[in-house]
Image: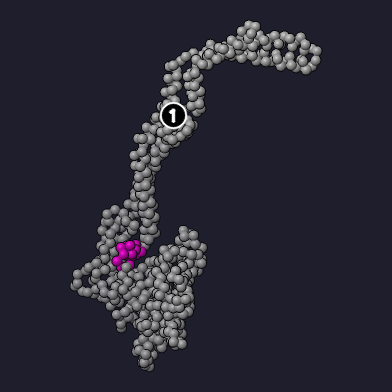
Amino acid sequence: MLTRLSVSNFAIIDELHLQLENGLTIITGETGAGKSILLGALKLVLGERADLKQLNDPDKKCVIEASFDVSKLNLEPFFEENELDFESESILRRELLPGGRSRAFINDTPVTLDVLQKLSEQLIDIHSQFSSENLLDEKYQMQILDAYARQIPLVAQYKINYTQRTHKKNELSELESLLRSKSQESDYKNFLLNELKEARLERHELEQLEQEQKELQHVDEIQKILTETYTKLETPEIGVLSRINEISSAMQRIADFADNLKLISDRINSIKIELIDLQDEIQSRVSRMEMNPERLDEITERLNLLHSLMVKHRVNSIEELIEIRADLENENTDFQILENKIAVVQQEINELENQLKSDSEKISVGRKGVISQVENSLLQTLSKLGMENSSMKIKLNPAKGFTPDGADEINILFTANKGAAMKPIGKSVSGGERSRLMLAIKNLLSSHLQLPTLILDEVDTGVSGKVADEVGKLMKEMSAGMQLISITHLPQVAAKGNHHFKVLKKTEQNFTKTIVRELNSEERIMEIAELISGSDISENAIQQARALIGT
């Protein structure tokens, strides 16, 4: 419920603070006193678009703040979803800045207008004489039947599954799109993968092949030089080994004469051993080496393949080609994973649709079972409100597939005149009739739902006498279980209020201001008497006012 409303620097409101209670609150005031301005301020803090012209003083900011008791509305999930601090007494604030910008806050946390509107929709419902959006909204019409059938929890679960199914269908569409995209590339990628597999790539292969190619290309020169080297080592008397043998023998004869000579002799002997090993290695290498043009052709062909693959894939090594091959193999695996995931999501959709089918059938049965009761209840209430000749027919037909509210389509036909053909409700009621019809619907819903604060803005316009009294009684009954605020000109309605505020226009120092004050018992009597007889209040009007209030 709305517990407090504060307004500063809005239109002709300079400063205003209202404390509000549960039950039926009445707001009265002369035409032009500022009731619509007060309502406009409230709509602004509930998320309506702002206009800089609404500033009273264009050089100061406008602040509108509304406090709500939300302790019984189960709104914790909303606050958690939007990362807001939950407070049982939550404050909505709107600021209009002189520069033209506006800001919105919930419990002092900045929020977007969209978040502010979504929360306010669950807190307050403002209905004026010409409001018809709800009456024409199929979702709202369905809610009337669901509330009466007491199946709101079942519908809520259906909506959860419907939302999940929508998300899953979107996910499936994205996966299938990705699969199509991958399918278009898969043939070429499979070709590349097979090409790399057939190449049988090995790490460090390139360096080894290039070295072997170089050796085969220069085999003649290598053999010639190795043979010459071997000859120079081996040739008797003039060869290196012959000379080193002579030197080694000579050094051994003098090695025992001094320690340093022994070291020199040992080093010469080591050289001799190394030269013998080197001679053997050269001899072995020469014996193994031969011209092999076939092997050279193989190596050249292999190198050409490897280089062409590196150019194609824009890399510089075999190792990088191996990584690309692994990536392509993984993509092939991803392709299979993607197909499996599509199958899983499709199965989830099938399961959700089976559940939706089951739930929607139960919901439809529940709705059909209460249609006649809803029709009778609304017509009885309308009869009390002076529309005793009304006729109504609620039609429920199968929808083409699942909708957010079930598998039904609803059409409400109505006429307020006896003998007249019934038409869709949006085309068959006038402004005053629409208000009374909406009041009857709100009354029906109030006994079956936890409704937010309801504000009725002159919905009783066009009625009088006994009907006006019945309107007041109906509002009083509704307010027993909810907070109802009624802006009215009817004394019969005003007399039923638990609390009564009057909107006045006051001029001070050439400035006109709107003020709102709560009336005490005697002030209420005088206000209602004024509604009865006008500004020239008669004693008879005062007595009538007392009678209406019951004092």
**Furthest residue in direction top, as rendered:** 236
Residue at the image position 38 percent from the left and 51 percent from the top: 167
Secondary structure under the numbered disc 1 in the rendered image: helix
**Is residue 130 within the magenta segment?**
no
Q: Is residue 264 left or right of residue 345?
A: right
Q: Which residues are magenta?
A: 134-148
Using the image as rendered, state which of residue 149 and residue 161 is in the foreground: 161
Q: Is residue 430 visible?
A: yes
Determine which quarter of the picture holds residue 142. Answer: bottom left
Q: Where residue 101 appears, x then y in whole percent?
A: 44, 69
Q: Which residue is mark 1?
A: 307
Q: Amino acid at mark 1?
A: His
Q: Where residue 103 appears, x then y in whole percent?
A: 46, 68
Tell me the colour scheme of the image: one colour
Residue at the image position 37 percent from the left and 40 percent from the top: 182
Q: Where residue 270 appears, x then y in whole percent?
A: 69, 15
Using the image as rendered, state which of residue 375 and residue 355 is in the foreground: 355
Q: Is residue 137 left or right of residue 101?
A: left
Residue at the image position 38 percent from the left and 90 percent from the top: 542
Q: Is residue 151 above or below residue 251?
A: below
**Is residue 146 within the magenta segment?**
yes
Q: Mark 1: few, some, or many residues within 10 Å (few <14, many ≥20)?
A: some
Residue at the image position 74 percent from the left and 11 percent from the top: 251
- Tell me the quarter of the image containing the C terminus: bottom left
Determine which quarter of the picture holds residue 22. Answer: bottom left
Q: Is residue 124 visible?
A: no
**Furthest residue in direction front, as rendered:** 238
Q: Main secondary structure of the magenta part?
A: helix
Q: Where residue 438 appears, x then y in whole percent?
A: 32, 71
Determine which quarter of the picture holds residue 345. Answer: top left
Using the image as rendered, state which of residue 361 and residue 194 is in the foreground: 194
**Furthest residue in direction bottom, as rendered:** 539
